[in-house]
Image (cartoon, rainbow, N blue to C red):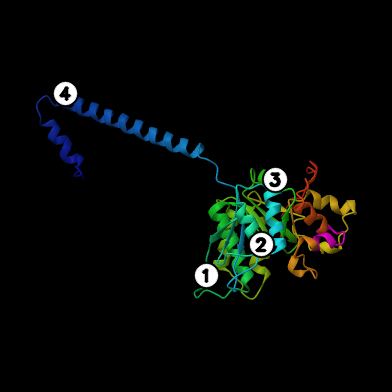
Amino acid sequence: MLLKKRSRNTLFPYLLRLPNSAVFCSIYISSLLSLFFFLSYHLISQFSILTKSTTQREPSPFYLHYVRFSSKPQRNFTFTDYLSVLSGVQYLRPDGILLHGDVIPNGPYWDNLTARNLIRHVPMNRPTDFGKREGKPKKPFSIEHFADVAKLDVLLKYGGVAIDFDVFFLQGERIKDILKRKKAITCYGDEDGNNIGFVAGHKDSKFLWAWRRSYIDIYMASDWNFNQAFVSKYLSVLYPKDVYVADFICPLFNAELTDPQNEEVMYFFRNAMALHTYERSLEKSIESVEDLKTMNNTLRSWLFRNIYHNIQVPPVDPNFNDEVIPDRL
């Protein structure tokens, strides 16, 4: 019920005209004080409940995310896709693994994972707001840009880690440790920009929010790297306390030409959180266990065999440092 607002100009003259007005005013003031203490107690109680619910709230599940959109009616789940997911299960140990996209994969490797409840598909439409701030939305440079924007969307919704299917975990537990003190992790590419093949963070990361917003405000449809790499680099300079820029995950190298017997080189990769192998750029694809058996002895074969056979990765060197400090543009 709504109460009619009473002007104090009408209230107090009325009180003063009453007999024994001093007594009445005393009762009135006492009532106001009682109301004040009641409301104070009520508000403090509600604040305490709110604070308790906030501070004692269960932590959000830690998810590993993949995103895949396809122009094909069906998309086979490949052997290396399978190895990427297995690397997450074994070396990241998330609370769940989600594949977001518009097509449910098929094939024996997908069936193997879903039968063991290791991954589930989450329907997701392609983002459509590229360059929307400038008026008419722009057509994305490629289908990969749809997936890259969607990675940022799912991280802002769920938090966790979002990767391409040619990223494979090694020291995945380090990601959780870093996210205890940072809001986001991005993958160093080169001096010009970062790599969106691997990105992690909390739902309230300013870095992730601003990166996602760039696709709406300043999307460069004609440049593959502008929003994907350059914007991330600029934002890492603006939000150094928010983001951890990690090296050795997305190096520009050929994993087929790297000798695992080279201890000086392998030191960095054994201690890295993950490794992006750029499978599409390699001449020889690995399509089955048989291919894995006949591969040359390279960093790539070492990595894949470790994952397939679930070989325990040695603990990370406590003196290892992969953080790139983005102190200048």
Q: Quadrant of the N terminus?
A: top left
Mark nearest the camera among 3 and 1 is 3
Q: Earlier in the sequence, mark 1 or mark 2?
A: 2
Residue 108: mark in rendering: 2
Q: Residue at x 80, y 69 (%)?
A: 284
Q: Tell me the amino acid under the disc marked 1.
A: Thr
**Depth check: 289 or 199 in front?**
289
Identified by mark 3, the residue type is: Glu
Q: Is residue 111 left or right of residue 174?
A: left
- Residue drawn 58% across and 63% down? 150
Give the left or right position of residue 15, taking residue 86 as reference: left
Residue at x 10%, y 29% (from the top left corner): 18
- What percent of the width, then of the height, locates residue 147? 61, 65
Mark 3 sits on what residue? 173
Read off the residue under disc 4: 23
Q: Nearer the viewer, mark 2 or mark 3?
A: 2
Q: Nearer the viewer, mark 4 or mark 3?
A: 3
> Which residues are drawn in magenta?
291-300
| Mark 3 → mark 1, Cα distance in angstroms | 34 Å
50, above or below 267, in the image: above
Q: Earlier in the sequence, mark 4 or mark 1?
A: 4
Q: CA distance from mark 4 to mark 3?
A: 72 Å
Q: Secondary structure at mark 1?
A: loop
Q: Name the mark nearer the viewer: 2 or 4.
A: 2
